[in-house]
Image (cartoon, grey):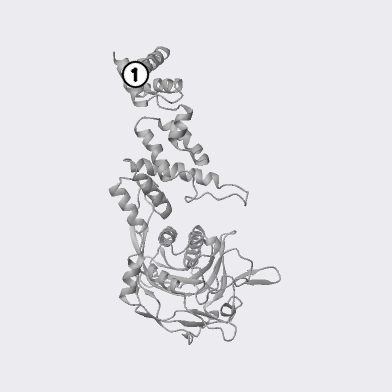
Amino acid sequence: MKYEAVIGLEVHVQLDTKSKMFTRVGTGFGQPPNTLTNPVVLGLPGALPVMNLAAIEKSIKVGLLLGCKIAPICKWDRKNYFYPDMPKNYQISQFDQPICEGGEVEIEMPGESPAVMGSHRKVELTRIHLEEDVGKLTHYESDSLVDYNRAGCPLLEIVSEPDLFSPDEVFAYLTSLRNSLVSAEISDCDMEKGQLRCDANISVRPVGTEALGTKVEIKNLNTISGVRNGVEYEIKRQTKAMLEGETIIQETRRWNPDQKYTTPMRTKEMAHDYRYFPDPDLMPVKIDQQWIDRIKKELPEKPFDKQRRYQSEMRLPYSSTSALCGDRPLCEYFEKAAALTKVPAKVANWVVNDLLRELGQNNDHNDPSAETVTLDNCKISPQALAELICLIEDGTISNNVAKELFPEMFCSGKSAKELVASKGLEMKSDGDEIDSLCAEAIAKDPDAAEKFRGGKEGAINALKGAVMKATRGQANPKLVDETLRRLLSS
């Protein structure tokens, strides 16, 4: 008998706000432990929560971005449990009236080749609700420490339907969701900083059946690739158990990223009864259509919509759009440069290859005091890149010369025109000089000349190379090609 997997994901996203969900205490990563707290965060007697408007608006924005139904009224509930990560022994969350219902996430499955777009489909969502984050526990050999800096930060929980069916789809879903949220400036979604966390619910069933199998939840999935690996392992474990006649029990398991296997944490019988009830200190939130319409005007173009537009309007190849469209600032940089040229595809190629390479190399250092180079402080502006490409297009310099100039432009901030003039790198287009160099190349390599005359088109490249070497790459390649063909056919 063959089995198939059914997967649902619960993704927790920490919203990028200046203050916490129910208090003015600031948010931030890397601060000294337990410094971002106050009586509200710690649940001290008499401390009352006050809602963060920015967090509510970002939640509505996410709902609109993902095609959810925005609730006209949502309310706050207390999720009661005793655990050191929540000092007041309950978490303010949303139970039966979440801020968003339904929705979908568009995903792309891998194509046959990395350079070819795969097929797209939409994964259905169940709901999105807003809550406060909990503190972080760090376990040691004989004790545990808790840091409440994260406690109280606004947290969105995005719950999918059991509508994913493979580890690759899980990876595509998380990648697409992350790109959309980062593009809309909802969150940085840095999993290393705990800004995006994911729990996976997995079951297997005989192929062709509709009923879901027994669900197993996996926790401790700390990277997008780690989620894929954990899901892949758990599918294999459950499938093997079913084939051997074992019974899958409903439980929560922990993923070990080093040893790459899951281990039991707790069974269904040990699950918490959270005893939800409405929070008496917080009023429900009424969301009218005028509010929704205002936020709708702020929505950015979705990454996949942008990718389709780049391909249809600018004729960009899939390889370039796939690198660009998940990064909103990079797209803005590209569009500014492309607007100043007539060759957007060449601009995209320079951005995703040369610019990203230099950014990566200059930030690949072990000195923590070194300044990180970003698009904001990069010394090559979109205008400077466009100028470099225009110099290639108008025949002032060759592409090879431009490639040599780019790293120097990146480090020095000097313009392409400035470097070309100071180094004397203008492309040689003097007809007499090119004629002489081409004749010399033919005389020195008669074998290549005869092969070309005999019908071997590629043989001309050896002659071109000789001319380009003699001019240190400054000869006009088009003129060299035309001259060689004329001389070889005469």
Q: Quadrant of the N terminus?
A: bottom left
Secondary element type, mark 1:
helix
Q: Nearer the viewer, residue 240 or 6?
A: 6
Residue appearing at x 50%, y 43% in the figure: 358
Q: Name above or below for residue 161 compared with residue 414.
A: below
From the viewer's side, name the closer residue of 240 and 30.
30
- Give amino acid for label 1: Gly
The spot of residue 167 in percent (x, y) is 44, 60
**Circle 1 crowding by C-alpha within 10 Å: few under 14, some 14–19, many from 20:** few
Q: Residue at x 55, y 45 (%)?
A: 362
Question: Which residue is depicted at the point 38% across and 34% down?
Answer: 391
Is residue 38 positioned above or below 119 on the image? below
Q: Give the x, y percent position of residue 21.
A: 49, 74
Q: Quadrant of the C terminus?
A: top left
**Would residue 262 appear left or right of 334 to someone viewing this image?**
right
Where residue 473 appears, as percent x and y from the top left, is: 44, 26
Return the residue found at the far right.
142
Q: Which residue is mark 1?
A: 431
Q: Nearer the viewer, residue 136 or 44?
A: 44
